[in-house]
Amino acid sequence: MRTRLSCLAAAAALLSGSVMAAEGQVGSYFTSWSVEKEFRLKAFDQSGAAAGFTYLVYAFENIYRMPDGGYRCDSGRDAPDAGQGAGMYATYDYARRFAAHESVDGTADTKGQPLAGNFNQLRQLKQRHPQLKVLVALGGGEWSRWFSAGAATPELRRALVASCIDLYVRGNLPPLDGHGGPGAAAGIFDGIDLDWEHPGPNDKASLTLLIEEFRRQLDALGKPSGKHYLLTSAVNSTDEKMQYTDPAAYSRSLDWINLMTYDFHGAWSKQGPTGFQSNLYSDPAAGAGSARSLDAGVQRFLKAGVPAQKIVVGVPFYARGWSGVDPANHGLYQRATGPAHGFEEGAEQYATIAAKKLPTFYHPVTRQLWTYQDGTFWTYDDPRVIGEKASYVRQRGLAGMMSWSLDQDDAAFSLSRAMLEVRRQP
């Protein structure tokens, strides 16, 4: 019941000038910690998919409360991810030395070169693919602790934004194990992706003002050279999160919104009922929570005043699931006894799920698929589902498609290559 693009033939067809449109963003989040999962950007490059992508977002960098009472981006050391999101993994960023066989351009990192680690791999990837823009993501689900406080006053906002631009866009990295220094990462990042994922009831104005401050400082930085630095934001698509924000206002300062149109259902509801995590359309038969869908999220933001050409829809490269699920309806909309077992409770990467070759079922209303076997239910996107979402994006004049996250795709980058359909001409 699933379709797959052939490896290099499909990539070559998609990347040929006769079928590619000039517009259409295709991007993915590239996680700093994926290096420890044996993921390498070299494989992404060699798959052919990188040639069709327009951007990557490097996730994540943290902000911190400083001794002077301000809030800053900071780096230069490693710290455990403890203390309510106080972690830092600078070694992954620019001090881990990649061997020749694992680097994008085949050269080994050495001690004393200003830039190593993931940042240097991104630099090498950009050299091979000049169309590729790279942004740095600030915050995320675990590292958004200090946004509210750091955005509270004009002075705090100016200092916070200036520190992040100096560190990542200007590239002034603190020394770390023989790497870093002034301008060490200059030219790596073409902009910033603000991932303030959990704004509260008192944050509506502050979020807009913080985004406006990023826009002002990025524009000032680029003015002498005529460079436009990108500014985007990852935004939850549900009404529960949107109610504390003003999309019409903050979107004016953004190049586009990375709309997180996934995680609609999951095993945080341990007893279910099971449901789709990233369905294209809503299913009235689903009962509680049935209104959640990619389409519902897009319509919500359009009605809020966000232009269609500023909406990039998100797709997950992972599954969500439950165990102990009743077999009725192949497990769909049924009670469960707990989360399914994956790389974390209730979640599994696409590469692992696809390799199992489980029996799949496709829902004609929601346009989502799922698997059910021996009481275990998984819901996820495959190339067919992503292809339908790409058609949806093209037909509605949206900005494009992004994914979380690159390292969870299979070895052939089947999902990444399926995303390239968003740039196919009618």
Image (cartoon, rainbow, N blue to C red):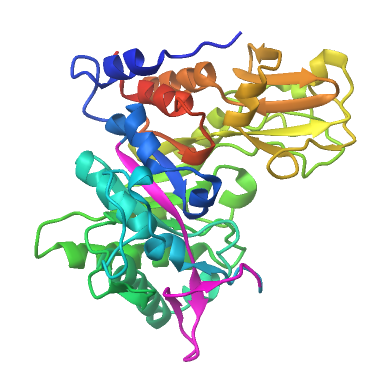
Above or below 195: residue 346: above
In this view of the protein, which residue sits in the foreground, 149 or 13? 13
Residue 73 on the magenta span: yes
Q: Which residue lies furthest to the bottom in this view?
A: 68
In this rendering, does residue 214 appear at all? yes
Above or below 290: residue 372: above
Asked if residue 391 lies left or right of residue 300, the reply is left
- What quarter of the picture does the N terminus occupy? top right
- What quarter of the picture does the C terminus occupy? top left
Asked if residue 140 lies left or right of residue 292, the reply is left
Q: Which residue is drawn at 19% across and 14% down?
A: 18
Q: Where is residue 282 in the image (x, y as percent from the top left)?
A: 64, 24
Q: Which residue lies furthest to the top in this view?
A: 1
Q: Which residue is drawn at 49% across and 85% down?
A: 66
Residue range corresponding to the magenta coloring:
54-82
Q: Residue at x 54, y 28 (%)?
A: 295
In this view of the protein, which residue sits in the foreground, 284 or 220? 220
Asked if residue 242 lies left or right of residue 370, the reply is left
Q: Position of residue 230 (x, y in %)?
A: 28, 52
Residue 74 on the magenta span: yes
In this rendering, does residue 306 appear at all? no
Q: Residue at x 48, y 17 (%)?
A: 388
